[in-house]
Image (tube, helix red, strand yellow):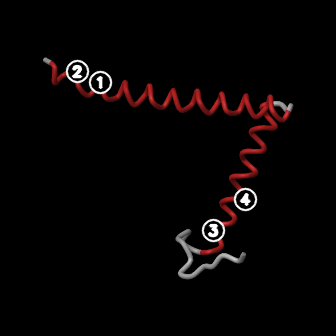
Amino acid sequence: MAGVFEPRSRHYKRAVHNDLEAMELEAAKEILAEVFRIDLAEVEDMISSRLQEVQAEVTPRGNGLWPQEFWVES
């Protein structure tokens, strides 16, 4: 009988974890809106524009892997 309910409990834990992540993301958005004194829609725009910037930085290099060589200038 315990084996019958095991998959449900795993799914429930995964759902709770996803809900927790969604709640944390929403809280972070609200904090950003309060700190920058902007609307939540503007926070969404900030996040999406930053995501586009990051994707643009990775995409031209080809496969998104680290370059073969790199150096740091001081």
Q: Are marks 2 and 1 in contact (CB under 8 Å)?
A: yes
The vertical placement of 55 against 42, above or below, is below
Viewer-proximal residue, 49 or 25? 25
Mark 4 to mark 3: distance in Å? Answer: 10 Å
Q: Disc number at residue 59?
A: 3
Q: Are marks 4 and 3 in contact (CB under 8 Å)?
A: no
Q: Tag 2: residue type?
A: Phe
Q: Which quadrant would the C terminus be assigned to in this image?
A: bottom right
Q: Tag 1: residue type?
A: Arg
Residue 53: x %, y % from top left: 73, 59
Question: In the image, is 68 to the left or to the right of 6?
Answer: right
Q: Tag 4: residue type?
A: Glu
Q: Residue at x 51, y 27 (%)?
A: 19
Residue at the spot of label 1? 8
Q: Residue at x 58, y 74 (%)?
A: 62
Mark 3 lies on a secondary structure that is helix
Residue at the spot of label 4? 53
Q: Tag 3: residue type?
A: Thr
Q: Quadrant of residue 61?
A: bottom right
Question: In the image, is 27 to the left or to the right of 1?
Answer: right
Q: Earlier in the sequence, mark 4 or mark 3?
A: 4
Q: Earlier in the sequence, mark 3 or mark 1?
A: 1
Mark 3 to mark 1: distance in Å? Answer: 39 Å
Mark 2 lies on a secondary structure that is helix
Viewer-proximal residue, 14 or 69? 69
